Image (cartoon, rainbow, N blue to C red):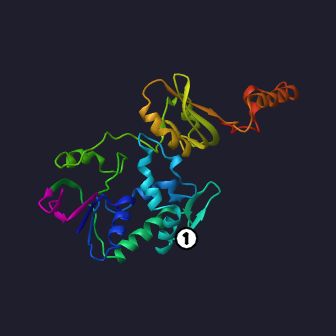
Amino acid sequence: KVLIIGGGASGMMAALSALENPDNSVTLLERQSRVGKKLLATGNGRCNLTNRNIRLTHYHGQQPEFARFALESFYVGRTLAFFERLGLLTVTEDSGKVYPLSDQASSVLDVLRFALDARGANVVTSCDVIEVKHKARGYEALCATGEKYFGDKLIIACGGAAKSSAAANQAIIFSRSSVKLHKLLPSLTQIKTDPTYVKALKGVRADAHVRLRKDGQTVQDSFGEVQFTDFGLSGPEAFTLSRAAATGGENQELALDFFREYGDGALLDMLQEKREKLPELAADDLFAGMLQSRL
């Protein structure tokens, strides 16, 4: 009997993997009213489920080698074959990102849910686990509603501190067990900045070279799409830099270059030529045809 806490992407994949052994039975406990809720928000609602260019060099942190086992055992080809067996058709963009052909994250969630049902998983939703006890030969999970569930093996997949996660309860649950929790820090998320200028740019997308700087020195940089919000910066490149920003302390800033294909000299030459041809043009209008108007 395999007991899984958390019905997100990890929990569902763990359940399907466990059910590949016909001797296993699986009970999947999810706090929300349905499984996979966060999956629907991934990739701006499109769910980029893998990337053709996945390799260890793209992983960061104190122990990037931690990812090696997963990348080698469940590599891209195997990932795509897995989803193809579930009935999901995919498409690969030039960037290497792989999306469902339907362009809807719900397609990914649907094939996972249908597979869980077909393989006999016991999926229990609206089950807020408040305590886990280590028994003599397994584990017992107690839900807020009073129900108890038992497993010979326990898989914890209840996610991090995102808004829709059960992270607030994690410390309570696991302080009563032998599980050690590391401090949680945000990663793969938006970056909050001084809203003075970005607020007026809400919704604007642009291609940029983004540098995260501390005390004037570049800590990490990234190239690609950014999106402005009313409180800061979002988009793939903000996500890439977010962990470093979360751990970097004070005196950090983001520097964005919207003309990364041009050097400073070439850009100044273009602006000077435009100024000579149109001497009465206002300074902000010099960028017409070169830059998004609100930028």
Which residues make up the magenta segment? 134-155
Asked if the magenta segment contains residue 204, the reply would be no
Above or below — where is 277 with respect to 239?
Answer: above
Q: Tag 1: Cα neighbours inside 10 Å, few (<14), some, or many (≥20)?
A: some
Q: Is residue 229 visible?
A: no
Magenta: main secondary structure equals strand
Could you tell me residue 101's position as x and y percent?
57, 67
Q: Residue at x 55, y 61 (%)?
A: 99
Q: Residue at x 51, y 39 (%)?
A: 241
Could you tell me residue 283's position as x and y percent?
74, 26
Q: Is residue 223 visible?
A: yes
Asked if the magenta segment contains residue 140, the reply would be yes
Farthest-out residue, right: 277
Quick one: 34 or 81, which is closer to the camera? 81
- The quadrant of the image that shows the N terminus is bottom left
Quick one: 139 or 236, which is closer to the camera? 139
- The quadrant of the image that shows the C terminus is top right
Residue to which mark 1 is pinned: 89
Q: Residue at x 71, y 37 (%)?
A: 291
